Image (spheres, grey):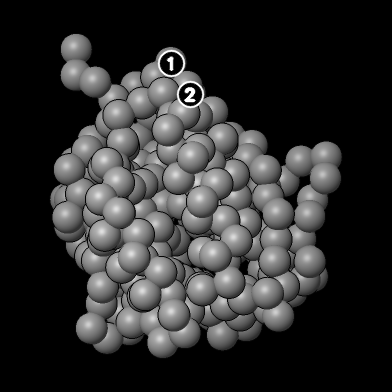
Amino acid sequence: MDEISYSIVCCYYNEKPLLEKKIGSFLEALKNLPFKNEVIFCDNCSNDGTTEILKKLELEQHKNLKFIYNEKNLGKGGSIKKAISSSTNKYIIIFDLDEYLIEDLIKGHKIIESDKKIDFLCGSRFGENNRFIYKKNLYGVIVLTKLINLLYKINLSDSACATKIFKREIYDKLKISTNGFDFEFEVLCKFAKLSHLIKEYKVEYYPRSFKEGKKLRALKDGSMIFKAILTSYFS
């Protein structure tokens, strides 16, 4: 039986304070992951010192770390695409270090290990303690998720969670046109449209403010995501 393996994709644009604060603990946590993995860091043409931090890390030659440096800003989705193209494992994990815990990847692995028919596993931030800071973002998540559930006949509570795990072989067959925050929604919708098995699990969520570096804008990015959901449905 083939070993379950994961390529963890981490994309950054101007995230020097975040990396300075969390990269050390992240690398330590990687040592405790109970599954085969590689981590792909993609720098999206940063200009605040993020690139230099990653290049210094690359020189340390840590095991199973890959580094990509975009010569121009490709958008979050464009960066994820580029990282996936260099991945080697069976499952892709999209993971944001800023607001999520690596321990929840272990929980996700156990779910997939117990049911290998799952094609797409999406984290959910909703539970007893909903920690959303901005109401616009919260309401946007609720509306977009309800729209996806209605159109694609699935049952998610949080389509916007930035912890997502999916099979690489299925992704490779999809034609993905988006390059921004809408990328993850297009991938999710196309998995759903082709009736692949999609499940959801609870993850911890510690949101940061715009002052702390949060970049997604509810109205601007939300309208692009809305368009991606509809375009995927009618294409």
The vertical placement of 77 against 60, above or below, is below
The vertical placement of 168 against 36, above or below, is below
Q: CA distance from mark 1 to mark 2?
A: 5 Å
Q: Position of residue 184 (x, y in %)?
A: 42, 60
Q: Is residue 170 visible?
A: no
The vertical placement of 12 against 14, above or below, is above
The vertical placement of 176 against 86, above or below, is below
Please indicate whether residue 68 sits to the left or right of residue 41 in the image.
left
* Quadrant in the picture for residue 129: top right
Q: Residue at x 51, y 73 (%)?
A: 15
Please indicate whether residue 28 sits to the left or right of residue 61 in the image.
right
Disc 2 marks a residue whose amino acid type is Ile
Q: Residue at x 49, y 40 (%)?
A: 28
The C terminus is located in which quarter?
A: bottom left
Q: Residue at x 79, y 50 (%)?
A: 130
Q: Position of residue 22 (x, y in %)?
A: 57, 56
* Residue 111 disc label: 2
* Quadrant in the picture for residue 169: top left
Q: Position of residue 201 (x, y in %)?
A: 58, 35
* Residue 203 disc label: none
Give 80 or 198, whichever is nearer the viewer: 80
Q: Residue at x 30, y 54 (%)?
A: 60
Disc 1 marks a residue whose amino acid type is Ser
Give 92 or 65, whichever is nearer the viewer: 65
Please indicate whether residue 35 sits to the left or right of residue 225 in the image.
left
Give 186 or 133, whichever is nearer the viewer: 133
Q: Which residue is mark 1?
A: 114
Q: Position of residue 225 (x, y in %)?
A: 49, 72
Q: How many marks?
A: 2
Q: Are marks 1 and 2 in contact (CB under 8 Å)?
A: yes
- Mark 2 residue element: helix
